[in-house]
Image: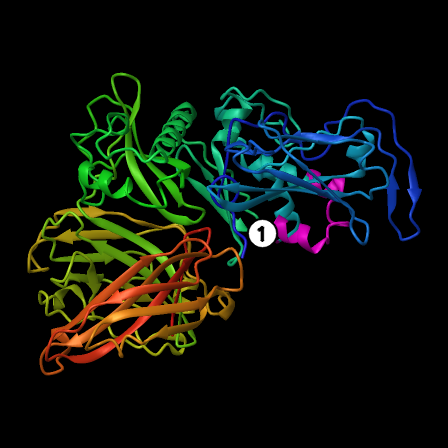
Amino acid sequence: MRTYRWNGRHALVTACIGALALVGCGGGGGGGTTASLGNGNTSTSMASGISGVAATGVPISGGVTGTMHGVVTLQDSSSPAKTLTTSTDANGNYAFTAAQIQGFVPPFMLQINYKLGGVDESLASAVTAADLTSGNATINITPLTDLVIANLGHQLAATIFANHNYASLLTPTALAAGVQALDAELQPILAQQGVSGTVDLLHQAFTANGSGLDAVLDSIHVTIDPSAGLETLTNSTTGQSVSGTLSNPPTTPLPAGSSNNVSDLQAITTTFNNLASLLGTAPSPTSPALLAFFDQAHFLHDGQNLGTFMQNITTQPKVVGGGLTISTAVLLPVPAWVSAVPVGSTAYKVRFAVLENAEPNSMTSFIAYKNTSGSWVFLGNQHLARTAIQSTNASITGAICAGLDIEINDKGGVGLTYAIVNGPQIPAPGLLYFATGKGGAMQLAAGAPSTYAGTSTQTLQSTLPAGCSRTIAGQVLPRTDTQIGAMSAPAVYTVQLYNGSNPATDVPVATYHPTLAVLPLTSGQASAADFASAITLSPTPQALFASGGTMNIAWAAPSSGALYANNLNAYICANLSGGVSTNTQCNEYNDQLIPGQQNASLTVAAAPSGSTLAGGGVQLTYLDDLFRQYWTSP
């Protein structure tokens, strides 16, 4: 599974691109000659070499000192294909000489493979015979060149490159049409940045100075969800987006928004990068340099104050040593209920992706404002508790299910008792989540909000779609293919938090609006290859029920590719008295997984004396590039 995320997939296109061109920029130069190969194709006598810039977010650096390890592969159209490789320099520049490509058959595809936060990424571009004989073959590799090719081939550019099926696809006429269609989508942003409406985005040289065409590129990122065949272009300065499919790309122009705040986006992104770099040095949670990034008096994130938040983040092994990457910042309006921003300050709600130690971690948001010294400082998300929603697919005893994982957790301990959730494909009067009295995480109730009965509220145990034999988890709302088909992403939900006992009269203490970024896969889109398999438990949770001990778990990773090990959860449940379900206590054990991990050991406590076994098992979670979850429970 290949997706576009962050600076490449889910790609942020920024200021580090030199001259942007997909096909040749024209100009003089002696015409080359061609020679028949006898197989319907011809090789071209090259009048010039090929060079350009590979960039997204920052230049894609390569070589020994490069942090992104960028390597460009040129592949021609002959069979078998001829290839060349070269590393980019510190500024993302690459080049192939005319002598190197003599005898190669156009069109060529270019693909740069690189790493972002340790995660493997790739982008593609194309070279035609006309480029090679123009005398000016400037061919850059960016998220936009990649998108044009994906739209032409109705599939990921990386798939087209791997299948070597582009000889008739990448013609000058087709590429020009793809460029023109992309230009049309970006007209509002072009106008806002003072760029001519007739400019060819993929051929026009420009200066990377944060203005004009460079500001346009800073404002855009591209998301491709290959599992659903969807593509989305987002304005990073407003959060507005347009969507379509790879076979039917969006045609509605991407709105520009009412203000031009690209410079704020650039400055906030730089501040995030500086924060990530400092966290990589393992600073003390009370380090003055670290605390300077935050509003120390008013910081609040998912119910945690700054002291608790710093203690957590500075002790995470995935962060210490430079494993944290923050990317794909999108500027949104500050919610009206946020009161911690100083009056008169420029401020945004900033949504961004978090990678930790070569794997996706989460999408989250901070409130950021510019202080009187001109520096950007962070307030956290200002939430009293954690409210988040993710798409989940699960393989439960071999049956593939889908649902919405709605997480509500009173991390700050403010005494929340229940929550009501409304949104797309949730029937009125909404879902009821309730505090169990066994930690901050709320569970999904079986009934409507009116059925709330404190910690005795019945947990959802309904029959699931697609033959699933038991509930996915206490937080997950099962969804059928029909329900998924009636949804569109991004989808905004409403979560109301309460600390009372009567849903008919209680007033919420807070209301938040988490966004579902990507839909669950339908039964036709998901397959067994997306899930971990061959899970073995030695000994089983049941065998350890009475005595406790160490449980060893091993498994095989999903075979579909581009999925990242995320979490291992084991649980053992005991009936404390008379087998009554409301008196069931479950002990859970979690292990945060690292890339490539396929075994773990967990220490399990003995069950309370006199209790009886109510059940137990394990759940493995993998993530894809768009933070969709893939759970496996044997």
Closer to the camera, 185 or 280? Answer: 280
Give the amino acid type for the residue marked by disc 1 in the picture: Leu
Q: Is residue 221 left or right of residue 167?
A: left
| Membership of 161 in magenta stretch | yes
Q: Which residue is denoted by mark 1 in the rendering?
A: 246
Residue 201 place in picture, x, y as percent = 61, 30
Residue at 80% x, 28% y is 48
Residue at 37% x, 32% y is 272
Which of the 4 image quarters holds residue 327?
top left
Residue 337 seen by the camera = no
Which quadrant is home to the N terminus? Answer: bottom right
Residue at 70% x, 38% y is 176
SS for callout 1: loop
| Membership of 394 in magenta stretch | no
CA neighbours of label 1 inside 10 A, class few (<14), some (14 to 19), many (20+): many
Q: Is residue 4 above or below residue 551?
A: above
Closer to the camera, 89 or 485? Answer: 89
Residue 363 seen by the camera = yes
Q: Is residue 89 left or right of residue 377?
A: right
Q: Is residue 562 left or right of residue 289?
A: right
Q: Which contiguous range is marked in magenta?
A: 155-176
Residue 386 place in picture, x, y as percent = 23, 49
Residue 299 place in picture, x, y as percent = 20, 34
Q: Is residue 390 left or right of residue 435?
A: right
